[in-house]
Image (cartoon, rainbow, N blue to C red):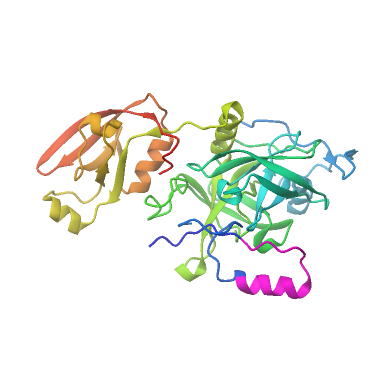
């Protein structure tokens, strides 16, 4: 069972002492990173850094002081104006400024089911926001806030190094403008068991900087104050985890955001099959001698997989020479391909070993899994 969830927080009108205590108590059982109800099943730089901060009256405040690398208090102070809280009818999440004219990047599940939201800034100002475009496949969305002159942070499109310091900024449990710190724990992570529920929980950055409900859509920054990821989910302590949080890499976020800006949609490579975990029991039922691979549970009629000759019951052993050890590994590899690419598979079918090629197409807009 997948223990990763991305839950929303009930939206409080005010955080009075009693209300805040009740919210905290209720939220301790949550196992996700955002604020939206109901929850889903699981749970090079691109621009110059900020030069000024907008004040509530729209005028520019003095530029923040430069931070020495690793000066966490100054980094947090500098980045706080670029991180927002997003309130919806059902809950709340976080977001990061994407452009000076009020464009905010967040998670799709934060704004799911909403066209209008409220955006709260670190200086206390709250403005109306409109959901401009969403991409459920990568769980990213753009919100247009009714405010300009915002400080756009640097989006670092190179992956961080494992062991590098990391700071998470957002609104965990509704506590706005919260910072937590840790390190980058791993790269190219996929959440086991997520393939049947969400395509977004693959090829993620792992961090031990605490992530909680309400952090979803917020910023993960490095020790230079650059955005390296967008908070996505975490595995809760109830599953036996200690500080296992996950973020969408900034490179993915920027790529999808630019596609959404261009025409409101993002293209993703589509294979047209349902992958499943290969267990010894399934291997025995299929009559094959295979310890690793991805079993094909179903094939879409006339999709790329079907046209390539892939059948239900086949085991995909590798894609372009990359071993497929789990369904999530297949999804992560497809994430790095484009519609129109031709990919080769090593396929096990009973006592046969086959080499098959599939011509990937753009994922149908109605299919987000």
The quarter of the rendered structure image containing the C terminus is top left
Q: Which residues fall within the magenta stretch?
A: 9-26
Q: Quadrant of residue 27?
A: bottom right
Instruction: State left or right for residue 178 relative to residue 8.
Output: right
At x 75%, y 75%, the residue is 18
Look at the image and tell me in which quarter the N terminus lies.
bottom left
Query: Where residue 118 sits: x, y (%)?
Result: 72, 49
Q: Depth check: give the residue in front, 200 or 190.
A: 200
The location of residue 93, given as percent across then percent down, is 64, 54
Tell which of 177 and 308 is nearer to you: 308
Residue 236 to residue 131: above or below: below
Examine the structure image and report whether residue 20 is included in the region drawn in magenta: yes
Q: Is residue 349 magenta?
A: no
Quadrant in which residue 150 is drawn: top right
Q: Indicate the position of residue 282 as horizontal and vertical percent values.
A: 19, 55
Expressed as whole percent of the image width and height from the top left, the position of residue 356 reads 22, 30
Q: Nearer the viewer, residue 140 or 191?
A: 140
**Drawn side of residue 369 relative to residue 106, left or right:** left
Which residue occupies the foreground of this view, 291 or 238? 238
Residue 90 seen in render: yes
The image shows a total of numbered marks equal to 0
Residue 324 visible in the shown view: no
Q: Looking at the picture, does residue 42 appear above or below residue 75?
A: below
């Amino acid at each position: 069972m997948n223990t990763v969830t991305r839950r929303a927080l009930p939206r409080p009108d005010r955080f009075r002492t009693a209300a805040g205590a009740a919210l905290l108590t209720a939220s301790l059982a949550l196992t996700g990173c955002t604020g939206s109800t109901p929850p889903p099943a699981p749970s090079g730089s691109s621009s110059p850094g900020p030069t000024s901060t907008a004040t509530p009256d729209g005028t520019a405040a003095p530029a923040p002081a430069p931070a020495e690398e690793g000066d966490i208090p100054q980094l947090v102070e500098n980045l706080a104006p670029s991180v927002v809280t997003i309130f919806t009818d059902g809950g709340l999440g976080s977001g990061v400024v994407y452009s000076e004219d009020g464009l905010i990047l967040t998670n799709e599940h934060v704004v799911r089911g909403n066209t209008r939201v409220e955006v709260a800034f670190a200086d206390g100002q709250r403005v109306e926001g409109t959901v401009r475009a969403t991409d459920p496949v990568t769980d990213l969305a753009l919100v247009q806030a009714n405010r300009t002159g915002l400080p756009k942070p640097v989006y670092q499109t190179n992956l961080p190094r494992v062991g590098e310091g990391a700071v998470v900024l957002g609104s965990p449990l509704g506590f706005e403008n919260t910072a937590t710190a840790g390190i980058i724990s791993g790269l190219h992570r996929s959440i086991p068991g997520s393939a049947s529920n969400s395509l977004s929980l693959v090829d993620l950055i792992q961090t031990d900087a605490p992530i909680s409900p309400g952090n979803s859509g917020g910023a993960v920054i490095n020790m230079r104050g650059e955005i390296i990821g967008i908070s996505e989910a975490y595995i809760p302590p109830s599953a036996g985890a200690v500080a296992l949080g996950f973020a969408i890499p900034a490179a993915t976020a920027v790529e999808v955001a630019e596609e959404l800006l261009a025409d409101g949609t993002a293209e993703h490579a589509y294979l047209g099959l349902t992958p499943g975990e290969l267990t010894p029991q399934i291997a025995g039922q299929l009559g094959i001698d295979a310890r690793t691979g991805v079993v094909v549970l179903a094939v879409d009629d006339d999709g790329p997989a079907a046209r390539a000759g892939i059948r239900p019951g086949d085991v995909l052993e590798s894609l372009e020479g990359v071993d497929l050890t789990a369904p999530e590994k297949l999804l992560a590899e497809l994430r790095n391909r484009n519609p129109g690419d031709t990919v080769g598979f090593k396929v096990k079918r009973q006592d046969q070993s086959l080499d098959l090629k599939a011509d990937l197409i753009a994922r149908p807009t109605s299919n987000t899994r």
